[in-house]
Image (cartoon, grey):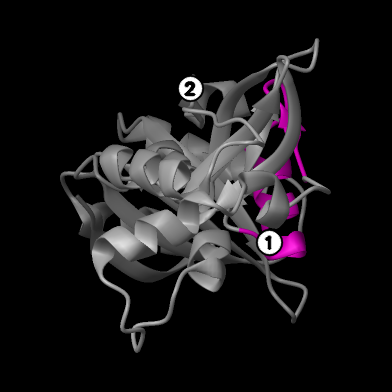
Amino acid sequence: MFVANCMTKNPVTIAPDAGLDEAAKLMERGHFRRLPVVEHGRLVGFFTNRDLLRTSPSAATTLDRFEERTLLSKIKVADVMQKNVITVTEDVTIEEAALIISRERIGGMPVLSAVGKVVGIISGTDILNAFIAVMGLDSGLTRLTIDVADSKGVLRDISTILADLDISISSMVTLPQPSGAYQIIIRADIPDVDTVKERLWAKGFKVSHVTQLG
């Protein structure tokens, strides 16, 4: 899965010379927290709700709402926006985007086309939703956690057992453990879990956890 499949497309943008009052209105109206800052079709910054909060009057201010808006209108987006913007292109995988967001400790980033045009925003929430979709967490399938040793043919043997029971695997993930063993997480439509567990056990595989999701 690629960023292009998960991002918020055609995001609202703002000019660097716009006032913070305009930025606040756009964010409030659209219920979003990030605005790419674009000038002459080129990304020049990134404005977030954090930038707005740190420049807005405190809750203890005696200013009324009109005075607050007037004050914010005098501060330009360019004065407080993030100038060194971390970006990705739309053909980057969702795993790479997740790694960047985690390592850089950011909530989201603009997505650029091959020619540098802003075409979307990818956020931590978008990545979480992609994970839910990929793993079939809302599909109502059964989730099996199988403990296995690190040996050749494990995935083939498990797949064969399920295929012999006419069970199609919806998703499969392998997780290495500190001991050198692995956990294999499978999601599938399994009408008779006990039979599956018995067949797996007979081949030396232990099902350590079973749950129904969705």
| Residue 105 magenta-highlighted | yes
Q: At 22% from the left edge and 60% from the top edge, which residue is drawn? A: 194
Residue 135 visible within the image = no
| Residue 104 magenta-highlighted | yes
Asked where in the image residue 178 lies, by quadrant, the reply is bottom right
Label 2: which residue?
A: 9
Residue 76 visible within the image = yes
- Left or right for 65, reference 156: left
Q: Name the foreground residue: 6 vs 165.
A: 6
- Left or right for 66, reference 55: left
- SS at mark 1 in the image: helix
Upstream in the sequence, badge 2 or badge 1?
A: 2
Residue 82 image offset from top left, x and y in percent: 73, 52
Label 1: which residue?
A: 102
Q: Is residue 211 above or below residue 159?
A: below
Q: Residues within 10 Å of mark 1 (few under 14, many from 20)?
A: few
Q: Amino acid at mark 1?
A: Ser
Q: Which residues are magenta?
A: 86-106
- SS at mark 2 in the image: strand
Closest to the camera, between mark 2 and mark 1, is: 2
